[in-house]
Image (cartoon, grey):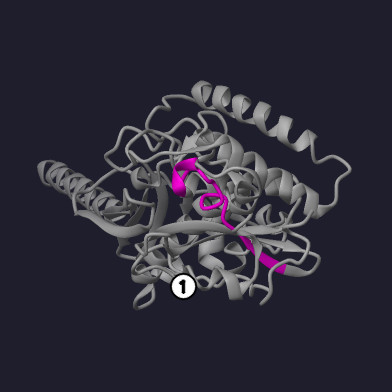
Amino acid sequence: MEKNNKFISFLLGIITIILFLVILFFGYIMYNEITGNKSINISFAEDFGFPKIEFGSENEEEIETTPVDKSMYEGINDGNTVSEKILNRHLYEQLDNESKIIYDKLYNNKEKLKTGRYTIEFGNTFSDLLSKDGGEEKLKKDYQSAIEAFIYENPEMFYIDATNMYINIEKITRIIGVKYNVFINTGKEDSYLAEGFYSADDINKCENEIKQVADKILAQTEGKSDYQKIKIIHDYLVDNIEYDETVSKDNIYNIYGALVLNKCVCEGYAKAFQYLANMAEIENTIVIGTGKNSEGRTENHAWNYVKLYNNWYAIDTTWDDPIIRNNGVLSGMLLKQAKQQYFLKGSDTMNESHFISGKFTEEGQVFEFPELSVEDYNEGVIK
C-alpha cells in the first residue's frame, strides 16, 4: 500500500511538471513575438534627386524585439506639432495624418539624426492602419510622401542621405492577436549620413560655416523691405555660386555646397535660396519640374516661389547666373538684365520655359504649389 502511494505521488509529480511545461509553452507562444520584418527605403536619382520607392527583402526569421511604451507617442500629432508652428510648410500641409506623424518624428529628432544611426521609433502607432486591407501599401506611400516633404522643406538637413534610411514594418503574430512595430533606421547600411559626413562633430562644424555665411548675408537685410530682402538673397547667390557641370562631387545638391563651397547644381541654388528666405521670414517654397534651357533642351530643374505683398512670384537663381548662359561674356545693362531674367516673375513669363511636375517621384504624391501672379512683379527690374 505504501509503495502504491509513493507511485501515485511520483506520477502526480510528473503530471504536474508536464502541465507546468505545457503552460509555459503556450505562454511563450501567446506572449513572445514571432516577427516578419519588411524594410522599405527611398532612392534618389543622381541627375537631380527625384526619389523612388524600393522594397527591401522580407525576413521571416524570428527576431527579438522590445515592447513599446505607448505613452511616448501620446500627443504626437495633437494639432500642436512643431512643424505646424513653422512658416513655409506648404508640402507638410498637404500630407495626410500618418505622413505628418512620420515627418514630425523626423523633424523633432533632427539633432539625433546627426549620429547617422539613430533609430526613429513609432512602436505600434500604425497598428490600426496596418491591420486593415491595403494598410501596409498605404504606409509605404505615407513614408515616401513624408520623406519627400521633409527633405525638400528642410534644407538645413543637408547631411542626410535619404537613400540610406529605411522604414521597417514588423508584423508581430500571437495567438491572442496581431500587432505591428514600425521604426526607421539604416537598414543594412552603416549610416544614413551623406558622403563626406561621418559624425555629429563634422556636421556641427559645417553648420557653423553655413551660419557664418548666412549671418553675413542676412545682416544686409536688417531693416529692409521684403522686396529688398529677396533681392539681396537672390543677388548674393547669383554673384557667388558657380554652377557645377561635373554632377559628381559631394554637396553639389545642398546648402553646404552652395553657401560654403560656392559650387552646386540647380537644387543647391534653390535650397540655398529656400534656407536664407526661411531665415529672413519670407514665405517661400521650393519647386521641382523641368525647364527648357536656352538651347531648347528639357532638363530636370528646381527653382523657388516667394510670397511678396500677398502675391506669389517665381525666382530661378540658377538661370539668373550669367555664367551658365553665354559663358559669362555679358556686361553692363545686358549683364544686369540677365541677372534678373527670372527674378520675381509671374506665370506668363515662367510658363514659357518652366514646367512644374508636382511629383518628386514617379509613384509619389502629387503636391500642389501656390498659384503664381499672372504678371511679373512690376518693380523687380528697376529697383
The answer to whether residue 124 of the structure is visible from this angle is no
The residue carrying pointer 1 sits among few (fewer than 14), some (14 to 19) or many (20 or more) residues within 10 Å by Cα, namely some
Q: Is residue 235 left or right of residue 151?
A: right
User: Hey, what amino acid is under mark 1?
Assistant: Val
Q: Residue at x 57, y 42 (%)?
A: 109
Q: Residue at x 47, y 30 (%)?
A: 115
Residue 183 painted magenta? no
Residue 254: x percent and y percent?
49, 41
Residue 367: x percent and y percent?
51, 70
Q: Is residue 208 left or right of residue 137?
A: right
Residue 279: x percent and y percent?
72, 44
Residue at numbered disc 1: 366
Q: In the image, is residue 89 above or below residue 3?
A: below
- Which SS class for mark 1? loop
Residue 320 painted magenta? yes
Q: Residue at x 20, y 53 (%)?
A: 57
| Residue range corresponding to the magenta coloring | 312-328
Q: Is residue 281 left or right of residue 294?
A: right
Q: In the image, is residue 200 above or below residue 77?
A: above
Residue 302: x percent and y percent?
49, 56
Out of 45 and 228, give the one closest to the viewer: 228
The answer to whether residue 189 of the structure is visible from this angle is yes
Out of 106 and 371, give the one closest to the viewer: 371
Residue 195 lies in quadrant: top left
Out of 28 and 346, give the one closest to the viewer: 346
